[in-house]
C-alpha cells in the first residue's frame, strides 16, 4: 500500500509523528487508496516556517512573473485532466464527468489568476493640496492557511490557493481528510510548474489539525470552506486573534417554479441541482418551492424522472449519482428521513440506503424526495448535504419569495419563470449571494464572485476579481513634493 507524504518547503516529508490514516474509496470500502500522514503541531510549525521564510522573496517577485508560473499550473492541470478526474472520483465518489468539471474549474481559475497578475490595479486620486500626489495599491498579506472540504477536491482549493499565490502570499494547505490524494496531486502540479520551495505547502491530517493552522501566530489569514459549525468556530478564533478570515459555509438553496415556467427545463434543473454530487454541494438545490397550480403535476414529473437516476461507482460511465462520502454521512441521511417522517412530510421517493449488488460495498443512498414539507420542519431549515430534496407548496409569487427567504442561509437561489417581472423581482428580493434565472442553483463560473449572505459566510466573495480583496491589503501612499509642511484638513481650508 502506498504511503504518501507531506509537501513542505519543496520536499516530500514523512510526518514527524510517524502516524498515518487510510483513505478509502466511498464507492467500495474494500478499496484502500493509500495511507496519508496524520500530522501534528511539529509538522504544522515546519510548514508555516517554510511559508514565512519563502514570503520574504516571493512577495518581491513581479506579479506578472508569478502569473507566468500560474499559467503553467493551468497547462499541467489541462494535460492531466482525464487522469486526475479518475483519481478524484475514486477518492470522493462523484462521477467522472463531474470530476472532469472540477478540474476544469481549476484550469479556468489558474488562467484567470495568471491574467489578473497584470490587473492588480490600485487607485490614484487628486490631493486636496498643491504639489501632492495620492496613491493606493495592493500588497500581499503574508502566510495564508487554506482549509477546504471534500466535495470539490481541486476546484475549491484552487479558488483560494491560486489567487493567494498570485497576490504574493505563501500558503499552508490542509485538504479534507477524506480527499488527501487530490491535495497531493495539487502539490505535484505546483512543484512541476516551478512554484518555489516554501511558497506552497501541504500538510495532511484530521480535523483537529486545522486548529493548529488557524491558531498559529505566523499565519496571517485563513481561507475556509466547510460546515457552518466549524466555520463559526474558526471565525471566533480569528476574531480573538485579530486575524483575517474568509468563510464559505453552508447553504439551503431554493429553486422556485412558477406556473408559467418551462416545466421540462425546471425539472432538469432540479434533478441536477438536487442530486448532482449526490447533493453534497453547498449550492445544492435542497428546497424546491412550487406554485400550487402546478404542484401535483410537477411532483409526478419529478418522481418519474428521479426514479430513473442510476446510482453506482463514479468510474462507471453510466453512473449518474455516486455515493456519499462516508458512513457518517450515510447515517445522517437516514436520520433526516426519520425526522421527515416524524414531522409529517410525505416521502414520495427513496429514503433508504441502496444495497443491491455492488452498491452494498459503498456508501450509497437513494435519491430521496419529500413532498408537503412546511416551513417549520427541520427538513426545510437544516442543511443535510446528501441526496434529499424537500418540496414545498406556495400560493403566489410573493409567497414563494417569502418562503425562499425563510432560511438562515443565503448562498444560491433559482427561479424558473418566463415572466420578466417575476424574474427581476426575484433578482432584487431573494436573500442570496447568487440567483439563477431558469437555471439550477449549481454551476458557478470562475470569473464571477462566489459567496453568500446570512449564515453562509462572512461577506467575502471568492472567484473573479473579488477574491483579490481577500488576499491583499491596501496600502495608501502620499507623496508631497511641495518642499514645505502641509497639514491636511488644517492648511487647506
Image (tube, grey):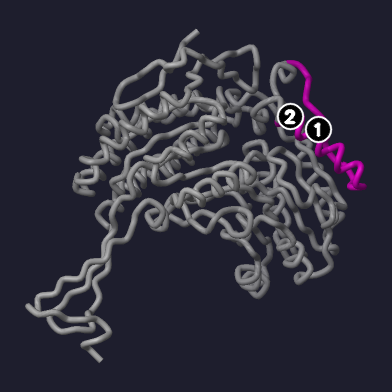
Question: Is residue 354 found inside the magenta-colored segment of the image?
Answer: yes
Residue 69, image x, y percentages? 26, 39
Q: Which is more toward the observer, 192 or 441?
A: 192
Q: Residue at x 27, y 34 (%)?
A: 195
- Contact, mark 2 vs mark 1 (Cβ under 8 Å): yes
What residue would you read off at disc 1? 334
In front of the other: 475 or 451: 475
> Does residue 374 sit above or below 348 in this rendering?
below
In terms of image quadrants, where is residue 68?
Answer: top left
Q: Tell me which residue sits at (36%, 47%) in the image.
A: 163
Q: Going by the picture, which residue comes out furthest to the bottom?
A: 493
**Which image quarter: residue 319?**
top right
> Which residue extends farthest top?
1
- Magenta residues span 329-357
Q: Nearer the viewer, residue 458 or 295?
A: 458
Question: For this view, does 48 lie left or right of residue 324?
Answer: left
Taking the image as shown, residue 42 lies to the left or right of residue 479, namely right
**To which residue does mark 2 refer?**
330
Indicate the quadrant where residue 359 lies.
top right
> What quarter of the picture does the C terminus occupy?
bottom left
Amino acid at each position: 500500500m502506498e504511503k504518501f507524504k507531506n509537501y513542505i518547503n519543496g520536499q516530500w516529508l514523512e510526518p514527524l509523528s510517524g502516524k498515518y490514516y487510510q483513505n478509502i474509496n466511498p464507492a467500495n470500502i474494500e478499496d484502500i487508496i493509500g495511507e496519508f500522514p496524520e500530522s501534528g503541531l511539529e509538522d504544522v510549525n515546519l510548514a508555516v516556517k517554510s511559508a514565512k521564510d519563502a514570503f520574504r522573496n516571493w512577495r518581491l517577485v513581479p506579479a506578472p512573473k508569478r502569473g507566468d508560473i500560474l499559467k503553467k499550473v493551468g497547462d499541467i492541470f489541462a494535460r492531466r485532466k482525464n487522469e486526475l478526474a479518475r483519481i478524484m472520483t475514486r477518492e470522493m465518489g462523484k462521477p467522472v464527468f463531474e470530476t472532469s468539471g472540477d478540474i476544469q474549474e481549476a484550469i479556468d481559475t489558474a488562467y484567470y489568476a495568471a491574467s489578473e497578475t497584470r490587473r492588480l490595479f490600485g487607485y490614484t486620486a487628486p490631493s486636496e493640496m498643491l504639489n501632492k500626489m495620492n496613491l493606493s495599491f495592493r500588497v500581499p498579506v503574508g502566510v495564508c492557511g487554506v482549509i477546504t472540504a471534500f466535495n470539490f477536491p481541486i476546484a475549491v482549493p484552487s479558488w483560494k490557493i491560486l489567487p493567494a499565490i498570485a497576490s504574493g502570499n505563501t500558503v499552508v494547505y490542509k485538504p479534507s481528510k477524506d480527499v488527501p490524494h487530490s491535495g497531493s496531486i495539487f502539490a505535484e502540479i505546483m512543484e512541476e510548474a516551478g512554484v518555489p520551495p516554501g511558497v506552497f505547502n501541504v500538510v495532511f491530517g484530521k480535523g483537529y489539525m486545522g486548529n493548529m493552522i488557524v491558531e498559529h501566530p505566523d499565519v496571517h489569514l485563513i481561507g475556509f470552506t466547510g460546515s457552518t459549525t466549524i466555520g463559526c468556530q474558526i471565525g471566533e478564533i480569528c476574531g480573538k486573534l485579530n486575524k483575517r478570515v474568509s468563510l464559505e459555509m453552508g447553504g439551503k438553496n431554493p429553486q422556485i417554479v412558477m406556473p408559467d415556467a418551462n416545466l421540462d427545463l425546471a425539472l432538469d434543473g432540479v434533478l441536477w441541482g438536487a442530486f448532482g454530487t449526490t447533493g453534497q454541494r453547498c449550492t445544492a438545490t435542497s428546497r424546491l418551492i412550487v406554485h400550487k397550480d402546478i404542484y401535483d403535476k410537477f411532483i409526478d414529473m419529478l418522481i418519474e424522472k428521479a426514479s430513473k437516476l442510476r446510482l453506482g461507482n463514479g468510474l462507471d460511465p453510466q453512473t449518474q449519482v455516486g455515493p456519499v462520502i462516508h458512513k457518517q454521512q450515510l447515517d445522517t441521511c437516514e436520520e433526516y428521513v426519520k425526522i421527515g417522517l416524524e414531522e409529517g412530510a410525505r416521502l414520495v421517493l427513496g429514503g433508504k440506503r441502496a444495497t443491491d449488488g455492488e452498491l452494498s460495498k459503498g456508501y450509497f443512498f437513494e435519491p430521496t424526495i419529500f413532498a408537503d414539507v412546511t416551513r417549520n420542519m427541520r427538513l426545510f431549515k437544516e442543511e443535510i448535504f446528501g441526496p434529499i430534496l424537500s418540496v414545498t407548496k406556495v400560493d403566489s409569487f410573493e409567497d414563494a419569495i417569502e418562503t425562499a427567504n425563510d432560511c438562515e442561509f443565503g448562498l444560491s437561489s433559482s427561479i424558473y419563470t418566463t415572466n420578466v417581472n417575476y424574474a427581476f423581482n426575484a433578482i432584487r428580493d431573494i436573500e442570496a449571494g447568487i440567483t439563477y434565472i431558469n437555471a439550477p442553483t449549481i454551476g458557478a463560473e470562475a470569473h464571477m464572485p462566489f459567496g453568500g449572505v446570512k449564515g453562509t459566510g462572512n461577506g467575502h466573495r471568492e472567484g473573479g476579481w473579488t477574491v483579490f480583496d481577500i488576499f491583499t491589503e491596501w496600502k495608501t501612499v502620499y507623496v508631497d513634493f511641495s518642499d514645505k509642511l502641509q497639514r491636511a484638513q488644517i492648511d487647506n481650508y
